[in-house]
Image (cartoon, rainbow, N blue to C red):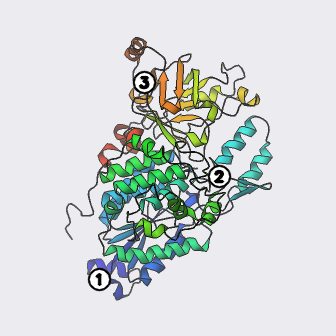
Amino acid sequence: MVYRSWLRAEGFTAEVFDGRPVIGIANSWSELTPCNAHLRGVADAVKRGVWQAGGFPLEFPTMSLGESLMRPTAMLFRNLMAMEVEELLRANPLDAVVLLSGCDKTTPAMLMAAASVDLPTIMVTGGPMLNGRFRGTQVGSGTHVWRFEQEHAAGRMTQEDLLAAETGMARSCGHCMTMGTASTMACIAEALGMQLPESATWPAADSRRLRTAQQAGQRIVDLARSELRPSRVMTRQAFENAIIINAAIGGSTNAVIHLLAIAGRLGVPLALDDFDRLARRVPTLVNLMPSGKYLMEDFCYAGGVPAVMRELSGFLHTSHIGVTGRTLADIIATAECWNREVIRPVADPLQPSGSGTAVLRGNLCPDGAVIKQSAASPHLLRHRGQALVFDSIEDYHQAAPDPHLDVQESTILVVRGAGPRGYPGMPEVGNFVLPTKLLERGVTDMVRISDARMSGTGFGTVVLHVAPEAAVGGPLALAQSGDWINLDVPTRTLTLEVGDDELARRRAAWSPPASPFTRGYARLYVEHVQQASQGADLDFLTGASGAAVPRDNH
Ligand code: FES
């Protein structure tokens, strides 16, 4: 009676207590997360499907992470959201759950939580915004912000132009419509088998977004009675498929960190080098910004993820079974590509095999670093230059406008102190705008190295996720302005050309920076966050605890 009575206060009839599955709808809706602001409507469509299939839907709010608004960076809170959703799923009497996500960090946070609880789960991402338009051209969220800000800094665009561009870039609800992190993670959720086919790409404003949500509601009722849980769906094979799809879509470097973190929850062995090994054979097929020309609406109408998977069927584990209960082979058998300019064939790819995210090693990054080759300048992928080192992104921002800054086009810009622990939260600042003096000379790209991340919508020859980061004493902390650095992406090496004796001398003089975070979640994060090469999860959150509550007095 105690359980029924309080739910009755919501006006439900007695039938909801007849033993039907209780389906949670975990909703990351928030007006502070513009990309997820439409998810109440999506939740209603999921509920329709749940009722239709004989389940009992109960929607509940979760923490939400708005990439564009949160300080110091939404990534600081990905693990907090994952922890919150995990505990909500376990503490409430749910038989299965539909996860509603959208903006960059909300999708991986929810997948991490689902992995640790292992209730039957389907994800429904909120879909991308409609394509951006500005003065007769297509403009992409994020990608064109960086471009236009660079144009503005170089004096080629006025403030009025910027204001006009910003509304054209955000024409509807939904997440960034470039192949940024949100689109990447939506495609990856589909490639992992955690959301329904085609679910990643329907635009947020398209009625088919709601149809797919209703179908997810119907399907989750069946799943609640099955053993097809996240641990059965997100297998090693599923992760390999996701890595291959990430390479083919020109996906975000952030996917590397998020997939490592999700795999860590499931105990699936996955290492940074798997990304390089698997992606090397895969050409970039999807012609989307920032690597290419088009946007998510175009990708959707061209056939979306199933069409890419069909093109890549020779690379994928097609016997994999996702939340549909069908094999991947069965799903993609009828997939078609409707626009070969947007989804290119393997025989005529956008970029050749091996041009995806590369993993670098060397004495500057003993535990690895990544570079998104498809978003870099080909002539800089082999480059030797002298370092100009900044201890923080703030130091760089202060120096960058200086007309007398001692910097050349061949200089390698190094920004440290922006890793998981150092910032904290590993902000997306790796593709920082070039020094003003060089922008004014028309320079558009330089080699940049940092322990930060880069927005999935960003571009440039930027080496990211250097591990170990400077704040924990990685070799990046020992680099000095004037040192020679050799970047050689074809051989996957990044070398600080300083002798071991000199590095040992510098190390002896180095001391770790004091953290200003003495309490609260930020302190917990700083004390427990793992390095980027491990997924930047909190050490005590790796692994799973299942859905059972340790002490259940009910
Ligand atoms: Fe939310 Fe880009 S800011 S997806």
- Please tell me whether residue 448 is drawn above or below residue 176 in the rendered image: above
Numbered disc 1: secondary structure: loop
Residue located beneath label 3 in the image:
363
Residue 218 can be seen, yes or no? yes
Residue located beneath label 2 in the image:
141
Of 240 and 450, nearer the camera is 240
Position of residue 3 measured from the top left corner of the image (x, y, whole percent): 29, 77
Screen quadrant of the N terminus: bottom left
Residue beneath the point at 75% across and 47% down = 162
| Residue type pointed to by label 2 | Ser
The reply to whether the C-beta atoms of the residues labelled 1 and 2 are less than 8 Å apart is: no
Screen quadrant of the C terminus: bottom left
Residue located beneath label 1 in the image:
19
Numbered disc 3: secondary structure: loop
Q: Earlier in the sequence, mark 1 or mark 2?
A: 1
Q: Residues within 10 Å of mark 3 (few under 14, many from 20)?
A: some
> How far apart in space, not on screen, are marks 3 and 2 (Cα)?
36 Å
* Res. 345 image quadrant: bottom right
Of 494 and 338, nearer the camera is 338
| Residue type pointed to by label 1 | Gly
Q: Residue furthest bottom?
A: 14
> How far apart in space, not on screen, are marks 3 and 1 (Cα)?
60 Å
Is ligand 1 within 8 Å of the beta carbon of the residue shown at mark 2?
Answer: yes
- Please tell me whether residue 284 is drawn above or below residue 495 in the rendered image: below
Q: Earlier in the sequence, mark 3 or mark 2?
A: 2
- Please tell me whether residue 85 is drawn above or below residue 431 in the rendered image: below
Position of residue 252 measured from the top left corner of the image (x, y, whole percent): 53, 47
> How far apart in space, not on screen, are marks 1 and 2 (Cα)?
46 Å
Is ligand 1 within 8 Å of the beta carbon of the residue shown at mark 1?
Answer: no
Position of residue 344 measured from the top left corner of the image (x, y, whole percent): 61, 55
Q: Residues within 10 Å of mark 2 (few under 14, many from 20)?
A: many
